[in-house]
């Protein structure tokens, strides 16, 4: 692992406190699938992304830089919109700029990867024994593949989709996934208001994880830790069929 990645990741992880608030909602019908967002829900790759972006900007001679907080603030947004938001000084990003930043981020992710939130690796394996699990994210396709290859997590998921592969909005991807697999009681798990809106537009319940990057407004369920989500969905006799 490269020193600049190590230092930024270690400093960032020490600075974050684990939230303790939990609110449990009663949902009697057992879901027929759990569908997960990626960034801020299953892992945090913002530090690696920031280093990759900044290396690409430095190599291009651009004086502007991004930080970890900025990367987190655009989580769940298609890549071109992320660039426009974080680097407004560049104006509408050219294809060359997008390619350069994408390549820089990819180098960062492939060198370091993201940091899985506590309980995610073991929790996904437990949940996969009971529910079909899916991934739907606004990330590039290579980014999703990097996550799936981490710690052998690919085997936990029935299928996945992302903006980089589908070129569609998150609500459209969720609806298409539901139609493909005949889902009627899917739950989308995410960390931002954008995730909540996507779930609502796709006709799904939304479970908000508060340890992520964003906030939500009156979600169906709220969890402060991934272990709490796992315990809720694996509780014996917790649902009716």
Image (spheres, rainbow, N blue to C red):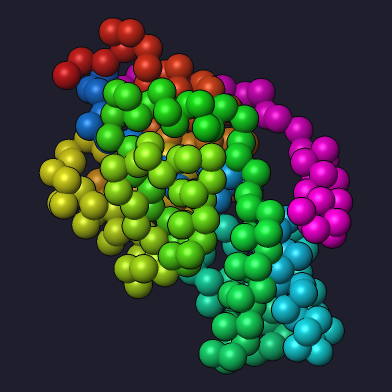
95 on left or right of 32: right
Residue 193 visible in this rendered orientation of the protein: no
Q: Establish if 50 lies above or below 96.
A: above
Count of marks overlaid on the render: 0
Residue with the most extreme top position = 237
| The image quarter in which residue 87 lies | bottom right
Magenta residue check for 10: yes
Query: What residue do we see at 43% from left, 65% from top?
Result: 141
Query: What residue do we see at 54% from left, 90% from top?
Result: 95
Query: What residue do we see at 28% from left, 8% from top?
Result: 237
Coordinates of residue 37 in the picture (x, y in percent): 45, 48
Coordinates of residue 168 in the picture (x, y in percent): 33, 68
71 on left or right of 149: right
| The image quarter in which residue 231 lies | top left
Range shown magenta: 1-27
230 on left or right of 150: left
Residue in front for this viewpoint, 99 or 223: 99
Residue in front for this viewpoint, 131 or 29: 131
Coordinates of residue 122 in the picture (x, y in percent): 51, 26
Coordinates of residue 175 in the picture (x, y in percent): 23, 54
Residue 224 visible in this rendered orientation of the protein: yes
Query: What residue do we see at 35% from left, 29% from top?
Result: 128
* Quarter of the image that includes the C terminus: top left
Q: Establish if 119 lies above or below 51.
A: above
Magenta residue check for 101: no
């Amino acid at each position: 692992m490269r020193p600049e990645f190590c230092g930024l990741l270690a400093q960032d992880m020490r600075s974050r406190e684990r939230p303790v608030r939990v609110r449990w909602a009663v949902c009697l019908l057992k879901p027929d699938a759990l569908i997960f967002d990626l960034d801020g829900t299953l892992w945090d790759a913002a530090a690696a992304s920031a280093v990759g972006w900044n290396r690409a900007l430095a190599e291009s001679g651009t004086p502007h830089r991004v930080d970890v907080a900025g990367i987190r603030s655009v989580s769940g947004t298609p890549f071109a919109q992320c660039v426009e938001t974080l680097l407004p000084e560049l104006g509408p990003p050219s294809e060359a700029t997008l390619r350069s930043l994408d390549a820089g981020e990819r180098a960062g992710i492939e060198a370091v990867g993201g940091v899985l939130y506590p309980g995610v690796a073991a929790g996904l394996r437990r949940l996969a024994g009971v529910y079909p699990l899916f991934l739907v994210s606004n990330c590039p396709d290579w980014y999703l593949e990097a996550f799936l290859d981490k710690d052998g997590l690919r085997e936990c998921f029935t299928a996945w989709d992302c903006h980089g592969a589908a070129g569609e909005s998150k609500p459209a991807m969720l609806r298409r996934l539901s139609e493909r697999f005949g889902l009627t009681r899917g739950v989308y798990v995410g960390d931002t208001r954008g995730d909540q809106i996507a779930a609502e537009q796709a006709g799904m319940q939304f479970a908000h994880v508060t340890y992520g990057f964003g906030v939500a407004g009156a979600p169906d369920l709220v969890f402060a830790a991934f272990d709490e989500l796992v315990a809720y969905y694996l509780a014996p006799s917790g649902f009716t069929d």
